[in-house]
Image (spheres, helix red, strand yellow):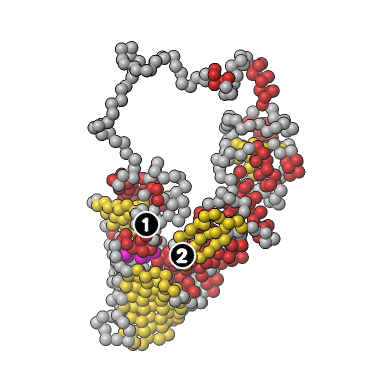
Amino acid sequence: MSDIIKLLPDSVANQIAAGEVIQRPSSVIKELVENSIDAGADDIHIILKEAGRSLIQVIDNGKGMSATDARLAFERHSTSKITCAEDLFSLHTMGFRGEALASIAAISQLELKTCRKEDPIGTKLLISASKCEKQEPEMCPVGANFIIKNLFFNVPARRKFLKSNQVELSNIIKEFEKLALVNHNVSFTLVHNDTTIYKLLGGSFKQRIIDLFGRSLDMQLIPLKLDTSLIKIDGFISKPENSRKRNALQYFFVNGRYMRHPYFHKAVLTSYDELIANDVQPNYFLNFTVEPESIDVNIHPTKTEIKFENEAPIWQILSAAVKETLGKFSVVPSIDFDTEDAPEIPAFTNDTDCTKPNIDFDPTYNPFEVSKSKVNSGYKSQIPSSLKNWEILGESFTKSKIYQPDEEPLSPEPMVELPIKDNFISSSIFSENVDEVKNNIICFQFNGKYIVSSVSSGIILVDQHRAHVKVLYERYLKQIERDEIVSQGIMFPVMLHLTPAQGAVMGEITDGLNKLGFNLSHLGGNDWTVNGMPTGVEKLDIEDTILQVIDEVNEGGKELSAKLFDKIALSVARSGAIPYGKKLSNSEAEALVEDLLALPDPNYTPDGKKVINTLSLEQINKMF
């Protein structure tokens, strides 16, 4: 039997590596810009066509490469950053694997022009799918000029699953923002389809934040600076009142490298406890400086997941630094103990010899006792004082607590919440006789979250928010199909100031939003105004809804255009649905359940969340 294990050709190995290193056009830009930073460039130009599908060009004024280095740079595991394994624990460069250029060359048609300051002439190199087609001398400025054409041209499956140009451009802009923030002393220019999106000059960290995200942040940021033997932290955090419900600007950098770190993110959020609501998050831009040997960046090819040797102490230091900064700038409420010039307030006790002007102390006074006058004036005790024995109590319960369908709905009163264990709730799909439920609905709200109704086989529990999401979603889709969406004007138009990344997606969804009942106008740049909204969702948070649609479109797939109306309808339904905690009358609860059960599939929301659960009679009997 012949041997079956074979060594893969370099071209195949590079394509496999490209699957991890190069995931989309933004990955190419990240790798090339980081190489430019490592080469000492202080001016970088990025030029795109069709969101990087047809062209990505990165031009820098770094130190450049010799003819030999230019050719060797595209070989796998060739790098100038490290020479031995020990160098991994003292990294001072962005790149070190030697995989990025080889991976890019494996899935594109690449052209490189580069020259060093000491060389009289530069080098031009042409590579297609890892194969070097030409290398020749050429006059070119000092630095490097990478031209990447037809990304994934030889990997059609990868190219097929790229998202729309607007979504890919949005991802490119987000990656660009991370690179520009951490390298604020470098000038950057970003051009897409001959339109300049960003032109940034080198400057301070705060100036770079303002240039990227707008001047409104100037008065919202608080400087944070801390220097310890373990870590040095500097940057900015936002005031609590400027926290955002959506799209919070949250950036961690360590030793000049962007990172994601949920553990440290939790440390920042914990410091804002009691200062912000649960549904909002603060902005922060924080730079960490630690000893290179105390972190490990060699966890993932994208190098954004970083392991710290001293995570727990740094967590404590970061939390304390944020709290101290908030307190230093009088953001945290404080108690003033200064008694100078304060009015004298007499204290009164139960002693008979103390002075009690205009106060008659009654030792038998009970503030929680319900007075007879209050009872007579309309206040009702939950258990009448006249009930002295169990027979009267049972008789009263029988007469007053049974609700008859032909009677008027009872007025909402405080309900005693019975503990119901989760394992009693059946996960089976609700399959009761719908006509029975429709014709004999007796509904009431439970715990501000659920609607309870009885059927012959037991009890059904309906999630009121999800039920309303399902009803609104189906209603909007039918109106879209019939072209019956009616838009109502807004007295005070809503202004939308989007980031460039959000603005790139907004152009794709404008027609869908207009068809769904929104009336949008483009003011230029990334500014929009909303002049109308769909009828029936008057309490809709317009700005939050549109931002939510943008986020969901950003996470969509290639077939997004065919499902765009579904996504928009779902976003609008979520924003306009009854929130948890909102009190419903019995008639409102009944109407919602009737609308839900009239749908062909009332059991699940459009995104697959359970709407209805049943508690069978058998399960109820087992409780007793």
Q: Mark 1 points at which residue?
A: 217
**Category of crowding for the residue at label 2, using alpha-carbon neighbours closer than 10 angstroms: few (below 14), some (14–19), many (at least 20):** some
**Category of crowding for the residue at label 1, using alpha-carbon neighbours closer than 10 angstroms: few (below 14), some (14–19), many (at least 20):** some
Q: In which quarter of the image is residue 375?
A: top right
Q: Is residue 146 rendered to the left or right of residue 403?
A: left
Residue drawn at x 45%, y 60% is 497
Q: In which quarter of the image is residue 489?
A: bottom right
Camera-side residue of 326 and 380: 380
| Residue 182 among those drawn in magenta | yes
Badge 2 marks a residue whose secondary structure is loop
Q: Name the residue under label 2.
A: 526
Residue drawn at x 66%, y 35% is 619
The percent position of residue 336, horizontal first and vertical second, equals: 29, 36
Label 2 and label 1: CA atoms lie apart by 16 Å
The percent position of residue 12, horizontal first and vertical second, equals: 47, 74
Q: What stretch is highlighted in magenta?
A: 177-184
